[in-house]
Every structure is written in C-alpha cells, then in structure tokens.
Amino acid sequence: MLQELFATTKPVIGVIHLLPLPGSSRYDGNLEAVLARAEQEAASLASGGVHGIIIENFFDAPFVKNRIDTATACAMTLAAQKVKAISKLPLGINALRNDGHSAMAIATAAGAQFIRVNVFTGAMLTDQGIIEGEAHELMLYRRLLGADRQIKIFADVMVKHAVPLGIGTDIKQSAKDAVMRGGADALVISGIATGSAPDDKDLKAVREALPKVPIFIGSGSGKENAGSLLATADGLIVASSLKRQGILENPVDVERVRSLVSTVQEISKKG
C-alpha cells in the first residue's frame, strides 16, 4: 500500500496545521489568511521532498469531541483544494478531535487519499471527555460515498493526550482490534502528547502483533531519531520538528523538511 500510495516504502508525511477556522472560538474572521498560510506550507513541504501531506484543524483548540462545525468542514475542504492545487502529492485529512465522518466527506469532496482518525475503535478518556470509536459507522459511510478503494483510514492506537478505558489497555490487542475488527488500513503510534515520541516498547509490540500492517509515527519524530523509529515503523507523520526554530506555532521551514527527508532517504538505502 505504501509503495502504491506514496511511491516509497518509507514515506514522510508533512503536516499542515491550519490556522483557526470558522466554527472555532479562535477564528478571527480572515479565511484568506488561513488559506494563504496553507498554500505557503504546502509549497514548503512539497519543495522539501515529502511524500504526502495531511491537513489538520490543529489551531481550533479547544476541540469539539465528535462532529466539527459545518463551517469548519467547508473551510477545510477549501484548504484541501488549495493544497492540491499547489502539490499533486497524496493528501490526508484529520478533523480534530475525532470526526472521521467529516474527514471522510472532506477527503471525498477534495480528492484526498487518506484520513487520520484519533479514536477509531475502543474508548479513550481525553481532554474533551470520553470519546468512543465509530469504526462501524465510518466504514459504512466510506462505502456509501463509494470511497472504499480511494480513501485509506489511518487509525491511531492509544492516541496522544488520552488514556484508554476498560479493556483497551493492551496496546497489542488495541492495534489488532483497530485492524482486524475495525478495518483500519494503517496504524499511527504516538507519544503521550504533541511532540512526544512513542515508547519503543509500545512500537515494537504493535509491530510484533501486526507485522504486515503499515505503521506510522504520529508524534515526536525528527532528524535525530528517524533512524531508530524507522527501524520498526514504516513512515513518519511530522509537524513540530519541521517548523521554523522548531516552534509549533511557526510556519513550515523548507530547509528542515529537506534535511529530514534526506535523512530518511539515507535510512531507506541502508535498509
């Protein structure tokens, strides 16, 4: 799947953190600035050599627990279209905090290739409260939209900024459930918070449980630890370490992108 979608077996997916959107308490009314920043970052990521891009309504915090506002979904669709006009790279959608339905709809309308879902199966206690996975509903919705083959689902396992509830405390079993019972196409393993790398034991446990399923690192990856992470994982979803001065609020730095992609390419050659 990775070779078919990203034309490489070790993809680097760059993240565009959209500025606050309509529907967010932080939105300032200037949608043109939001879209211009998205275009700028898409150009930086593409010029830097990433293999895919994913957009998130990251600066909309505090997030809604489930369905995002209709205006937010519309704005994300516009942003996705702007990004696709800049770059022909595979595009993903993540509608925070956990709106797989809107992400799927946006991806379908904008021609994106994958979505990320933070809580796909099981239940997690988060800063938005208890979030329950909706794998059944999302898989049906993908079928309804006729996107079964076009849009892949990247599912987080024990997502950051959350703790599991009930039986979902075994990361190996949670990963198996996401794929075998939920139907996820790929898995995302993160640390405890934005910018935190995953625990090596957790990463290896998921790989042992599902040796043939694509695994992405969802937080805390950069040039310094790419080698150790990609010894087990298949790809990186990168945001913080690609920003100017490594500061989360800053725009993407094309030189940081080039440096990371070059490092991953060297790892792939050795690998």
Image: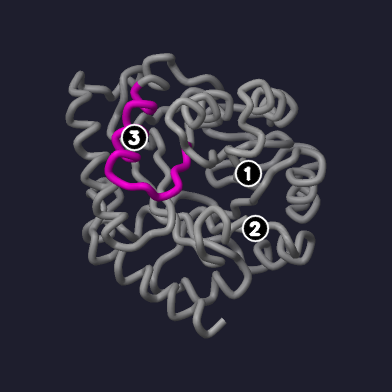
Between residues 265 and 227, which one lies in front from this camera angle?
A: 265
What type is the residue that disc 3 sits on?
Answer: Phe
| Along the viewing direction, whichever of 63 and 266 lies nearer the viewer | 266
Looking at marks 2 and 3 on the same chain, the residue that comes earlier in the sequence is marked by 3
| Principal secondary structure, stretch drawn in magenta | helix
In this rendering, the count of numbered labels is: 3
The residue at the point 31 percent across, 55 percent down is 46
- Could you tell me which residue is drawn at 65 percent across and 58 percent down? 214
Q: Name the residue under label 3.
A: 59
Q: What stretch is highlighted in magenta?
A: 75-93
Q: Name the residue under label 1.
A: 155
Residue 115 pos. (x, y %)? 54, 39
Query: Helix, strand or loop at disc 2?
Result: loop
The residue indicated by pointer 2 is 214
At mark 3, the secondary structure is: helix
- Please, is residue 200 above or below residue 155 in the view? below
Residue type at mark 1? Ala
Image quarter hosting the N terminus: bottom right
Q: Residue at 45% x, 63% y: name it.
A: 221
Q: Dot 3 surroundings within 10 Å: few (below 14), some, or many (20 or more)? A: some
Reply yes or no: does residue 124 show up in magenta.
no
Gap in angstroms between the C-alphas marked 2 and 3: 28 Å
The picture quadrant where one finds residue 27 is: top left
Image spot of residue 196 (x, y percent): 47, 58
Question: What is the CA distance from the residue labelled 1 to the residue labelled 2?
Answer: 11 Å
Q: How crowded is mark 1: few (under 14 residues within 10 Å), some or many (20 or more)?
A: many
Considering every residue shown, the one lying at the far bottom of the view is: 270
The kind of secondary structure element at disc 1 is: strand
Quadrant in which the C terminus is drawn: bottom right
